Image (cartoon, rainbow, N blue to C red):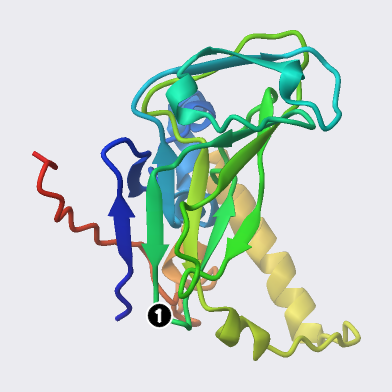
Amino acid sequence: MSTVNVYCQNQSVNIKQTRIKRDWMEETAEKHAYKCFPISLANTIGYELSLPIDVTFVWDGISDSSPEHIKILSGEEFIQNSRANATVSFKTGIVIKSDSNISFLHMPVPNMFNDSYQTFTSLISTSFFDQEFPSAIKILKPDKAITIKANEPFATLVPISLTSMSDIELNLNDFDMDEKWYKDNEERGKVAYELNKKGEWTNWYRNATDHNDVQIGEHEVKSLKLIINDNRRNSG
């Protein structure tokens, strides 16, 4: 088990495990989108960042090295002063310290779609980087007041091991499956069709079974439980 220390200033972003709920998933019929295990599990990966107050800004559509083209309407205490190229940088107020085999991936919140801005994806080696953790977004719509509401996730932090990733070898091979594979695939499709007609979900992938409910493997994990210990003196 790896331990990561996050040092928070008095004024900092909120950090929580990324939530499973998404507005668009809530709006699907009977919330059936949550039945999709690959999406639901991905929703909870890492730690979401949000701000304790609303932040509102507007970009005039000009993208150059001048900070004059973005006007902050509210929440300026959480915005960096040097804003250029249609970007907004946040004052996160946190410093992350990890072991050398852990880096932090900063990325958009999984499956939380937004047409007003895009969160930058970046990698930080937090074993030695002792400055305030950087977080920024790219504005996509000019001449529009964009508000990131208090407690609304705008980015996700994912601890990853780049060393382990570098050891993965990907082999590309010819698609040469035997007759049984095609037969099983056809049968699986028929069974799934009949279940779906009855309004049922197969759950084969979630349970790592085939269409005959025979166990064919196991997931690395079926749920992500990320522990957050708040040791700050003023956390209460």
Question: Callout 1: helix, strand or loop?
Answer: loop
Is 143 on the left or on the right of 192, as rendered?
A: right
Disc 1 crowd rating (10 Å Cα; few below 14, some 14-19, many 20+) is some
Residue at point 30%, 56% (across, down): 7
> Looking at the image, how many numbered discs can be counted on the residues?
1
Residue at point 62%, 81% (across, down): 165
Whether 17 is drawn above or below 189: the answer is: above
What quarter of the picture does the N terminus occupy?
Answer: bottom left
Extreme residue in the right direction: 174
Q: Considering depth in this image, is 113 or 141 the residue closer to the camera?
A: 141
Whether 141 is drawn above or below 32: the answer is: above
Tell me the kind of residue under disc 1. Asp
The image quadrant of residue 70 is: top right
Q: Confirm whether residue 214 shows in the render.
A: yes
Q: Considering depth in this image, is 42 or 164 the residue closer to the camera?
A: 164
Is 199 on the left or on the right of 144, as rendered?
A: left
Residue at point 35%, 62% (across, down): 223
Q: Confirm whether residue 202 shows in the render.
A: no
Is 214 on the left or on the right of 17, as rendered?
A: right
Q: Considering depth in this image, is 42 or 31 the residue closer to the camera?
A: 42
What quarter of the picture does the C terminus occupy?
Answer: top left
Residue 219 image position (x, y, % from top left): 45, 75
Residue 82 image position (x, y, % from top left): 65, 33
Residue with the mark numbered 1: 99
Whether 97 is drawn above or below 93: the answer is: below
Residue at point 40%, 80% (across, down): 99
Residue 222 image position (x, y, % from top left): 38, 66
Residue 160 image position (x, y, % from top left): 51, 71
Whether 135 is drawn above or below 2: the answer is: above
